[in-house]
Image: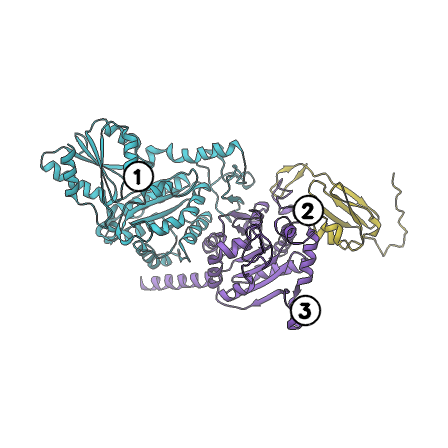
Chain colours: A yellow, B purple, C cyan
């Protein structure tokens, strides 16, 4: 359960997340209305449409410009940049996916 | 995510009612970010609207919200503000709501220079009722009540506001978004009547009927035709047709109405005390 | 000690508002109601109150509703043409259950009519003027003292029942001067709306589980809420096609109709043994009283029923009266409006005859006396 701004409990929305080591793109399918603004205005063609909803087609092309999140009218897509610790001298092993 | 919108949105209200491709959601997010950056407590802000798609915005926001009658948001907001001049009162209104039926209230609020922020979401049409022409529908465009092409001349909303006495006038668009946050902040911070026109798109009842093939095309139309004021100023006169400046278009300082009114009250009450 | 003042009706109305705790007036100039605004313009600033001349009548109602939502007791005053303009926003006030007082000083109509003459032809508009099913409380004073006390009562009823209340009189009463007594503060009761005591997160602006009149929080007081003129649920949010709309509308009507005993007031003059009754309110009620006195002097058993509350209509009282008199005479400054309500309640138990006059002058007591003689 999640908690709303008013402190009331509410169901958590289903989120489709796609990520790589640099960025996580979260899509809330229930909110997406298929307007395609994010798809068409993404400068690096990360996004596409499937069954009238947005989906990530090329996560590695994403440079976290945040324009899709900024321009989505429906709170349907969010970008989480992952920070890379540049000062660390250790090479971080990226865990292989299961 | 760059911003936690959930803290301001009333629970269970999303997805909102606006159509696919309606740009009001973009403006909504900008408004939340702007108010958040001003650190205005939720209890200290009221958002008042009239009737129309733009006017549905307040229902979604966890502030003191008031959804009134068509064109009449400003008088209700005036009552709230005069009763509680220490609080922040915002009005959100569509182009028809603010400049047609609400025109009289619009110009008088400007004249009074009362400290209310009037945000006009201009999508060039009466969207909620199915696409009738409004005082801002471009000449020649098709609407259900102008099926052969609109013949009505249009208002220039910032000019109207300035002429009526508004002391902060700006224009933003749903495309130029980081800039929009700053404009909203400027409009709210200004002490006096602020009018911020925000250019929006209604793909469903306007765009589709007027050769805009997608909501994105309407955003790109805004990008091409609404230029920051400095860039607009550099255009040669023959190239300005169909283009409009954005940014803070006009600003001046003038006595604010609540200050003047309550200043008078303080003076009179002091006189009465002396006389007693 | 009360204060004696020689005031015109409009001024007494303003004094009543001040006595009841009104601190916010918004209006627009209109004959014959303008003096209410002018009097309050001279008084309100000295108590830190707000007086606003808005750009039109519609804005005036909007402003007083906004102020009331912020916790102020508020009022506006107008006449026929302005009353017509106000209807939409008055309906908003009724649906959103916002206390406020609307004064209508009736003048000749329709349209611009006779601005400087009396009428009683807005009385049905008071009840039915705005669209949709809506609760109406409407008071009809007939003396300058009563304009004062009924305005105080209007504010109290509006706070008690969380609804706009209309005070209606006419140009003659508005401009006539009579000596009135203004009691000391505390003598007449002054009521305030019930505010919520629950935690803000539990507050619902139209919470019917708390009674037919739900508690009402002020804007900016920590109780955030959404108020909309769309039909709404108890949490204030719009609903469509829901049985809830029906039950909530019934609650709104019941708020008023179910509290008739508390809201209805009237004066009777020599009615106990009357054979002919006069049903009249406002300035016609004054003529009716004179006529009854003249009739009694000639040995005719006439009596007067003078409502102070016209809406809700005193149905039971009129029906009971009809069962024991030969005729009810309804003098009104219209071509017949309130007479329909009288006939509806009489249900044929006795004759109902009207005296109608719309030429800019009040009904003369001798006109009523002649009619009494005719019907007895």
* Residue C206 vs residue C336, the one in the foreground: C336
Residue B80 shown left or right of residue A50 in the figure = left
Q: Name the subunit of mark 3.
A: B
Q: Label 2: few (<14), some or many (≥20) within 10 Å? A: many
Measure the C-alpha gap from mark 2 to mark 1: 53 Å
Measure the C-alpha gap from mark 3 to mark 2: 32 Å
Q: Quadrant of residue B233?
A: bottom right
Image coordinates of residue A45 in percent, x first then y, are 80, 52
Measure the C-alpha gap from mark 3 to mark 1: 66 Å
Q: Quadrant of residue C303?
A: top left
Q: Name the subunit of mark 2.
A: A
Q: Element at badge 3? A: helix
Looking at the picture, does residue B140 appear above or below residue C319?
below
Asked if badges 3 and 2 are on one and the same chain, I answer no
Q: Element at badge 2? A: loop
Q: Element at badge 1? A: strand
Looking at the picture, does residue C12 appear above or below residue C258?
below
Task: Residue C309: give its label.
Answer: 1
Q: Residue furthest left?
A: C298
The residue that disc 2 covers is A75
* Residue B76 vs residue B240, the one in the foreground: B240
The residue that disc 3 covers is B231
């Amino acid at each position: 359960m999640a908690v709303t701004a008013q402190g009331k409990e509410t169901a958590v929305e289903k989120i489709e997340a796609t990520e790589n080591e640099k960025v996580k793109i979260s899509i809330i399918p229930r909110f997406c209305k298929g307007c395609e603004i994010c798809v068409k205005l993404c400068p690096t063609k990360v996004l596409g449409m499937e069954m009238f909803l947005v989906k990530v087609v090329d996560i590695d092309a994403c440079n976290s410009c945040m324009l899709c999140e900024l321009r989505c009218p429906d709170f349907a897509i969010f970008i989480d940049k992952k920070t890379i610790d540049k000062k660390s001298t250790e090479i971080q092993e990226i865990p292989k996916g299961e | 995510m760059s911003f936690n919108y959930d803290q301001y949105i009333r629970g269970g209200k999303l997805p909102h009612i606006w159509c696919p491709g309606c740009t009001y959601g973009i403006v909504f997010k900008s408004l939340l970010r702007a108010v958040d950056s001003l650190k205005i407590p939720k209890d200290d802000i009221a958002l008042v609207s009239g009737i129309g798609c733009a006017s549905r915005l307040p229902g979604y926001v966890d502030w003191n919200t008031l959804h009134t009658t068509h064109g009449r948001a400003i008088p209700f907001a005036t009552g709230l503000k005069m009763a509680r001049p220490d609080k922040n009162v915002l009005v959100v209104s569509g182009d028809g709501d603010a400049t047609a039926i609400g025109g009289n209230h619009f110009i008088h609020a400007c004249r009074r220079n009362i400290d209310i922020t009037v945000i006009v979401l201009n999508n060039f049409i009466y969207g909620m009722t199915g696409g009738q022409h409004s005082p801002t529908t471009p000449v020649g465009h098709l609407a259900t009540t102008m099926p052969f092409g609109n013949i009505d001349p249009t208002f220039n909303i910032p000019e109207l506001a300035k002429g009526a006495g508004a002391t902060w006038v700006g224009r933003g668009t749903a495309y130029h978004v980081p800039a929009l946050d700053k404009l909203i902040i400027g409009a709210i911070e200004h002490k006096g009547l602020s009018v911020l026109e925000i250019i929006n798109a209604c793909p469903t009842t306007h765009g589709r009927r007027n050769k805009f093939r997608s909501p994105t095309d309407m955003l790109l139309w805004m990008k091409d035709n609404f230029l920051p004021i400095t860039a607009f100023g550099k255009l040669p006169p023959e190239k300005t047709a169909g283009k409009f400046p954005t940014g803070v278009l006009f600003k001046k300082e003038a006595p604010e109405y609540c200050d003047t009114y309550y200043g008078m009250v303080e003076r009179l009450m002091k006189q009465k005390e002396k006389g007693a | 000690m009360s204060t004696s003042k020689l005031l015109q009706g409009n001024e007494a109305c303003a004094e009543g508002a001040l006595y009841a705790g009104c601190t916010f007036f918004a209006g627009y100039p209109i004959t014959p109601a303008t003096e209410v605004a002018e009097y309050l313009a001279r008084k309100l600033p000295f108590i830190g109150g707000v007086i606003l001349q808005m750009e039109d009548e519609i804005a005036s109602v909007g402003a007083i509703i906004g102020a009331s939502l912020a916790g102020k007791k508020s009022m506006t005053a107008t006449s026929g043409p302005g009353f017509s303009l106000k209807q939409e926003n008055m309906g908003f006030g009724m649906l959103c259950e916002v206390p406020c007082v609307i004064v209508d000083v009736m003048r000749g109509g329709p349209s611009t009519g006779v601005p400087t003459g009396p009428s009683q032809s807005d009385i049905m508009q008071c009840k039915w003027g705005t669209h949709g099913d809506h609760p109406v409380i409407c008071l009809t004073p007939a003396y300058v003292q009563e304009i004062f006390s009924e305005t105080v009562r209007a504010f109290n009823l509006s706070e008690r029942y969380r609804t706009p209340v209309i005070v209606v009189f006419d140009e003659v009463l508005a401009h006539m001067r009579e000596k009135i007594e203004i009691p000391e503060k505390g003598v007449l009761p002054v009521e305030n709306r019930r505010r919520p005591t629950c935690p803000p997160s539990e507050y619902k602006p139209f919470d019917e589980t708390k009674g037919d009149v739900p508690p009402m929080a002020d804007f900016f007081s920590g109780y955030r809420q959404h108020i909309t003129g769309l039909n709404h649920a108890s949490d204030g949010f719009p609903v469509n096609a829901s049985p809830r709309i029906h039950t909530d509308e019934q609650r709104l009507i019941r708020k008023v109709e179910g509290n008739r005993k508390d809201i209805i007031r009237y004066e009777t003059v020599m009615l106990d043994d009357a054979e002919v009754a006069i049903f009249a309110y406002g300035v016609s009620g004054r003529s009716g009283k004179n006529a009854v006195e003249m009739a009694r002097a000639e040995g005719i058993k006439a009596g007067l029923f003078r409502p102070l509350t016209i809406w809700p209509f005193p149905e039971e009282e009129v029906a009971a009266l009809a069962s024991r008199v030969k005729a009810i005479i309804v003098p009104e400054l219209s071509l017949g409006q309130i007479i329909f309500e009288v006939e509806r309640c009489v249900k044929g138990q006795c004759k109902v005859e009207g005296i109608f006059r719309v030429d800019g002058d009040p009904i003369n007591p001798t006109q009523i006396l002649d009619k009494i003689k005719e019907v007895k």
